Image (cartoon, helix red, strand yellow):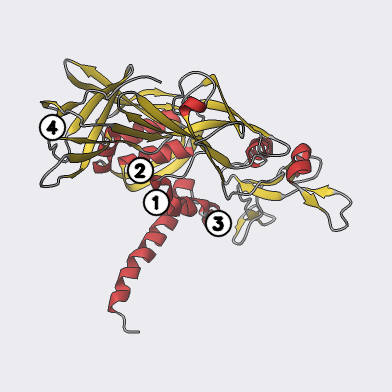
Amino acid sequence: MTGRVPQIYWYDRWDTRIGMLPVAGELVHTEELNGEDTIEFQTREVPVKGDRLLWLDGATWREHVVVRTDEPLAGLCSVYAESSLCEMLDDFIEECQLVNRTALQALTAVLAPTRWSVAHCANLGTAGALVYHQNALWGLRRVAEVWKGEVTPVITVAGGCVSGRSIRLDAQRGSWKGLRLVYGKNMCGCTRSVLEQDVYTALYGFGAGLPYTDEEGNYVPGYRRKLTFGELNGGVNYVEDVAAREVWGRWNASRTAKVSSFGQVTFSDVTDPARLLALTRAALAEAVKPKVSYEVDVAALDGDDADLGDTVAVVDTSRDPEWRLTARIVRRVRTFGDGVLARATIGTVQPVDYAVTSALAADVAALQDDVAGIDGNLTTAASVQVVESTVTEAIDDLDELSEVQF
């Protein structure tokens, strides 16, 4: 991969052109799927927090916003800037109930309070989510999470300034370019991380909770059994990968046969057994793979230049039997200097900050079936809102403990 330090076009927060911002030394660009997109460099000038930095990355325009500067009394100013998507942190969504919406409808709704538009949205089916008292960036990430899409900002430049900001939501970024990684054969500078997630060779699948009713069809309060697919699957409520069991299973008590490692998945919005069976099979295809990532110099990949999201064939010869799997470039760090040095993380998508902060909201959403079971009539959006309100009030009440004597 060849290249050099890109030219940085410097604008203030009102998009007024200031000039060029010269980079002293190297510029580091870090990006990950549905996550971090930052640049870091040093300069003799001192940009102001909120200034906008525009640069051309090959044929793609990128825009970053200065969020931090380190300014010594003597020496160079260090600049840290984030993708201009970060401006959505200042756009507020009071309430957006997305019930049985397409990805395009959801994306349009969460972008409504922003100055961003929709450049493209893949057909990702229908789903539902509640965005309540959140910033628009959280809403965008939530849409990507629920509808299982991947976000790309699109910057349009005309007349020497940014003329448009829009969002692509694809089912999957990147492509297959024939890239191949062979781990364990004369390779240096590569780190393998085997992640803590378990490998399962069989999965139970559960769907939406089924309400109890009396003989007259009236809802009866209480716990509910969840939808299963045994009637379509030979009487068992799980799916199994026999080949994977031979590799990742374990002996039974008498060491006469190998048995599977069982896990479970729940799709709380699924009410059709056939769809539940299909989703569980798809989940099993991922569960039988070891969760592993490789951090490697891009130059070690056999093939063309590597872009974020590209699919890579991995052959891990250090294992017996060797691992053969496909993985994706989920993170890329490029250092622009005399040339471009690039390191890529190949594997599963790592949790990013927004996903961690939204963990509570995900837990609340998982409770919606239990709440609906109280009277059997609550809508999905309403049930989530009631529980979320209750949880929020409980968290707020924690502040009152400061006045309590123990």
- State the CA–CA distance, disc 3 to disc 1: 23 Å
Can you identify the residue that label 1 sits on? 357
Mark 3 vs 4: CB contact within 8 A: no
Callout 2: SS:
helix
Of label 3 and label 1, which has the lower sequence position? 1
Q: Is residue 383 visible?
A: no
Q: Looking at the image, is 145 positioned above or below residue 340? A: below
**140 and 187: which is toward the camera:** 187
Q: Position of residue 152 (x, y in %)?
A: 38, 28
- State the CA–CA distance, disc 2 to disc 1: 9 Å
Q: Position of residue 176 (x, y in %)?
A: 54, 21
Of label 4 and label 1, which has the lower sequence position? 4
* Callout in the foreground (3, 4): 4
Callout 3: SS:
helix
Image quarter in which the C terminus is found: bottom left
Q: Position of residue 165 (x, y in %)?
A: 27, 26
Horizontal arrangement in the rendering, residue 68 relative to residue 283 (left or right) = left
